Image (cartoon, helix red, strand yellow):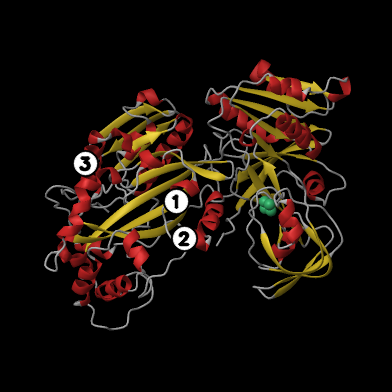
Amino acid sequence: MTIAFRDETFRDDYTFRNSPHAIRRFPFPFHEDRYMYAVNIEPHALPGPKGSVVEFAFDVDEHYVSEMRDRELVLRQDPLRCQALPHMMAAQWDLLELIMTSFARDYPEHFSLERDGERWHWVNRPLGIDQRFVFGDALTLPYEPMEYVTRQAQGDWVIVDQRDGNLWMDAGMVTTQADWSLDFDIGMNFFEWHGPVPLAHELGVFERALKYLMQVRVGSPVRRLNWTMTINPLLDTAPERYPVWGPDRTTVTPDNVGHKAHLRVELQSFWRLPRSNALLFPIRCYLIKLEELVTVPKWARRLPRVLKSLPQELVDYKGLTRYRDTAVAWLSRYDDGAPTSPGGGPD
Amino acid sequence: MAVRPQSIKVRVAEVVPVTPLVKRFRFVPLAGGLLPAFSGGAHTVVEMHDGAVVRRNPYSLMGSPDELDSYQISVRKVEDSRGGSVFMHERVKAGDEMAVSPPVNLFAIAWDARKHLLLAGGIGITPFVSQMIQLDRSEMPFELHYCIRNDDRGPYWRDLQQRYGRRVQVHRAESGLGMDVEALLVMQPLGTHLFVCGPGPMIEGVYATARGLGWPEENLHSERFQAPATGAAFDVVLRRSSKRVHVGTHESLLEAIEAADVEAPYLCRGGACGQCETGVLACDGRLIHNDHYLSAEERAAGRKIMPCVSRFEGRELVLDL
Ligand code: FES
């Protein structure tokens, strides 16, 4: 299937929109009408449901070309959004191989890869790239392998090294993050980088999650959804740029909330990289305007109910304090009180 | 939450005697194509159907991580073991169909190490074969010290010396020239990581020496392939699945749980990784802890057991499974 790539922006004039097709495949994260914290990890069994964002290893959608342009702008301002500690070179090649082979297999009309031993030929038609290089020789690429390939793949990419019974954030390309910083977290272990989350420690979830992640095997990736909300379709909500996007939260009014407020869902997956034994942690961000979301009646009913049931400390943690009530009031106009069906997908 | 991985159906392509006690097995995928890629030091769990008993033993993958049309393992025959290695030696022939697990690595290369110091004893050489291929390719400094009884009893030492030259040193115990671990350790540059694989006493001896010299714990890596101990038969109650399971003399608690179709997580099946840790809900008797994972306090508390290697003696054991 050929994807019609949109030409849009995630900054300044914010022309980002979802097509009706993109709305229907949006990974709506709420399976019931109230919010529950749980370790919601499941196998990333491939291929997933046809047309869904989990059909393939890594989703490429209509926002691909514009998101890649946005990444380039971020990197131009702040090259530290892409960093790798020196011992991660084997993992970088693992990542390049995984993305290129997946894209070429899953989207043959857009990407192709020919391999002749170590001599590789990569073609990325949407971005107009045609590159011959020697696998394993970083000097034959314009960037190091991780940066090269993740300038061509949507979402953030974090590679964690597994050693001493812990996971260490030792490489990453992070430009579409929900308020966290690679430059701050690089070199940290699993417990250190999760430090700021409230409640969860008490539940012992992190210990269990760590143990689970360390046993993720080659060929058996797992995934989970996470969510927050963002004002304006801004991919890059980095803490370093808080002065730019933080004040947007005060601009929400009952008139503009449907257009300005976005549900932001992260599809996180976890992969064992075969030759380095590192873990790959892709974090793919999906944005949807509330006015787009309410075109699906089930979501229009469910989202206000979930937001209402959110504990205050989570409202604060997710940064929704200033506009949750405005969003709930606006959304409730679309909730006719009818029961909703279980599961997250549209009816 | 943990999902038991799909096993991979393979055919035994070749069985090669390496020494009087060691045979090498090569597996090719039944479905054709390539096997999952792996990293140096990884192992696979081989499933053996011996009559009604299903054994699952871990073996290091010793081929090249770049040649994935087959997997290779080496098995040393241990006469009085539970029978896994004897089964492999006496019953498995070229052409047989078997199943292996996707690769798992609990003995991975330390990519941030300045140097790898590898110490192998006997069949403990196997994880280093694939590690050295990767280290060599990545141009990372390494040095292997390989302890064998005599020239005929050490698998692969000639090939390895040929391939890596001075980076491979062989120590022959029978010639009276064993390895002087302390002398070796004091010569190492800062930032060296020590890897040891061999019999339990060798690992313990090397660790004691390294700790005595002040080596940091995170620079010490070991892998022991310990077959689950045999012992008297016993019964166990699995509370969540409401099942009573009999554990025979020659099977492990984990194998008995699996045979009862109850899902239990595992990785190493040798008491080292911690993945199979299971809650003990009631215990009227004595837990026989054979693992290297639980702390002394945890053992004393008696609330946890590692079913891959540990057993029980007494009236009643109830597990949280
Ligand atoms: S499976 Fe590793 S300790 Fe039991």
Residues marked 3 and 1, same chain: yes
Judging by the rendered image, the residue that carries numbered circle 3 is A69
Mark 2 vs mark 3: same chain?
yes
Q: Which mark is residue A200?
A: 2
Horizontal side of A37 relative to A288 (left or right) equals right
| SS at mark 1 in the image | loop
- Chain to which mark 2 belongs: A
Taking depth in this image into account, of A82 and A181 the one nearest to the observer is A181
Q: Considering only vertical position in the picture, is A62 above or below B282?
A: above
Badge number at residue A281: none
The kind of secondary structure element at disc 3 is helix
Q: Residue at x 61, y 31 (%)?
A: B131
- Rounded to the nearest angstrom, the CA distance separating label 3 from label 1 is 30 Å
Q: Amino acid at mark 3?
A: Arg
Q: In the figure, B306 relative to B243: above or below?
A: above
Residue count near mark 2 (Cα–Cα under 10 Å), binned few <14, some 14–19, many ≥20: some
Identify the amino acid type marked 2.
Ala
- The span from disc 2 to disc 3 (Cα, nearest Å) is 36 Å
Q: Quadrant of the C terminus of chain A?
A: bottom left
- Kindly identify which chain the residue marked by label 1 belongs to: A
Badges 1 and 2: C-beta atoms under 8 Å apart?
yes
The answer to which quarter of the image holds residue B317 is bottom right
The residue pinned by badge 1 equals A194
Which dot, 2 or 3, sits closer to the camera? 2
